[in-house]
Image (cartoon, coloured by chain):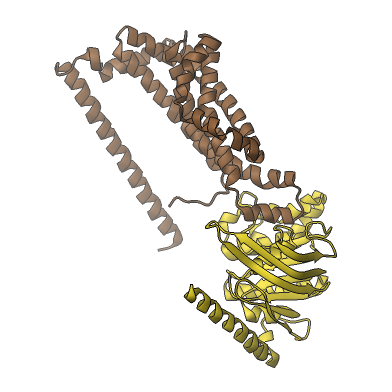
Chain colours: A yellow, B brown
Amino acid sequence: MIEFAGVTKSFVTKKNDVLTALQDVTFAVREREFVAIVGPSGCGKSTALNIIAGLTTLTSGRALVQGKPPGEAKLDIGYVFQQDSILPWLRVIDNIEVGLKLRKVPPATCRARSLELLRTMNLEDFADAFPAELSGGMRKRVALAATLAYDPHLLLMDEPFGALDAQTRVVLQDELLRIWNAHQRTVLFVTHDIGEAIALADRIIVMTARPAQIKAEYEVGLARPRQAGDARYDPRFDVLHKQISADIESEITRQMLISARI
Amino acid sequence: MTDADVLAEAARARRLNAVRRFADRVVFYAVVLGVWEAAVDLGWIRPFFFSSPSRIGGDLYRLVATGAIFPHLAITVYEAFAGLALGVLFGIGSGFIAALWTRLADALDPVIALLNSMPRVAIAPMFIVWFGFGPWSKITLVAVVVYFTVFFSTLGGMRSVDPVLLQSVRVMGASRFEVLRIVSMPFTMAWVFTALKTCISLALIGAVVGEFVGSQAGLGFLMLQASGSLDTTRLFSVMIVLGLLGVLLFTVLQRVENYVLRWRPRTDG
């Protein structure tokens, strides 16, 4: 489904320095797999998603989505951004229908689908509200609904639940797991919450501090279907959590040493 | 206290505040106008230069009662609105073109900067030569005066669209044109709308200055006439009419804006 072979991405910053976000990154994601990417914040995880979505180019290496260069692959991609990404001038229900209308879905079908998603996301009472009237958590749910509405084949998620309170987060994680179980879409999920990665994913890719390389990969191996809240009671959870934490802590320490030297 | 009591209490406090504010204003204006009137009556200042509230009131009444003001008011409003419409239309159109065709915009940048730095009403005498003493010289002047404000706010709007919104809709499968229609245009229109309030006052300035330079009718023409016959009372009257017109248009536009841009986060309070 997704193949990264020696992908490197460098930017020129405003101060005219070269900043390498990804360096020689190689990994693959299989069809219907749920993969989480964890790593220190600001390490280039989002850059990887942007390359897959065709929003940014790569400097060297090769990236393929369904065997084609990103952007050329004819498949529906859903991208849940870290920041607010819903249109502030559209009501909640119209935001959810943006992707459907782009696909020329008949209005009645659009409405039925968006109402169903509003129920799923517990937003029924806010169908006609503007985003500015909602809390951050609710806006995130609208963004998720807008992404799920057109049933994308590949779901890219960039710390989608990062800004939410613990309860809402578990509810949405469960919702995501339920949807994934029902539809078996491919998911690439970026997070810095190790517990979240273990609870949701089949496989976890750990990235190093910038320039991001792949530090380790772990098979999660918890049974499916899962409940996000239950994963942490599995004995394997602690083992994995410890290992990944150690990986990331060593990276953060290394990063601090590097920046201290500069 | 029940909720209803709390609400009633708050409403009472608001009413009291409003009454107090109104009373303060009445007292303040009464004192200012009274002192002005008294100063003229007692011979401290000369009505020839400063007129007086009663003279201005009487003149305003005559202007309205005889209907003499209305043809001039209509002409000025017509010039301001027609010019505004033209300026907004061209401003938005060329703003979009400049935002999309960046090479053209870069090439024209020095010229635009020069034109924008020029005091725009300076072109008024030229337009009198080109378009004569009728309304068209004023309409074109207003259009030019308004144009740059609209052009720059369109360009500014297009350049400050949140890139995440653009990316988000693009990933959903929108073409470049669809991204423009769904994201860039609505966002930019909000910017332009906010600029329209400035444009209303610019349009009135343009129309009146145009009439000063050369005209046969309009509120500016009326003032020029009054100035020629040293009629300060009439000058005050027409200035008041212009002020009221500006306030009226501004208020209407503010209401429309509050409705059209009701999705914006509230910043008041």
> Which residue is found at the position 47% from the left and 24% from the top?
B120
Residue A125 pos. (x, y %): 64, 60
Question: In this rendering, would A48 be left or right of B162?
Answer: right
> Which residue is found at the position 61% from the left and 75% from the top?
A192
Question: In this rendering, would A213 be left or right of B208?
Answer: right
B33 up-or-down from A83: above or below? above
A255 up-or-down from B25: above or below? below
A225 up-or-down from B18: above or below? below
Where is the N terminus of chain B found, in terms of image quarters?
bottom left
**Location of residue A203 by image quarter:** bottom right
**Location of residue A193 by image quarter:** bottom right
Residue B167 pos. (x, y %): 68, 55
Which of the pair A85/A74 is nearer the observer?
A74
Residue B253 in view in this figure: no
Residue B96 pos. (x, y %): 64, 37
Which of the pair A158/B189 is nearer the observer?
A158
Residue B13 in view in this figure: yes
Residue A11 pos. (x, y %): 62, 60
> Which residue is found at the position 84% from the left and 65% from the top?
A66
A112 up-or-down from B233: above or below? below
Which of the pair B104/A227 is nearer the observer?
B104
Question: In this rendering, would A80 be left or right of A134?
Answer: right
Which of the pair B58/A247 is nearer the observer?
A247
Q: How many marks?
A: 0
**Location of residue B103 by image quarter:** top right
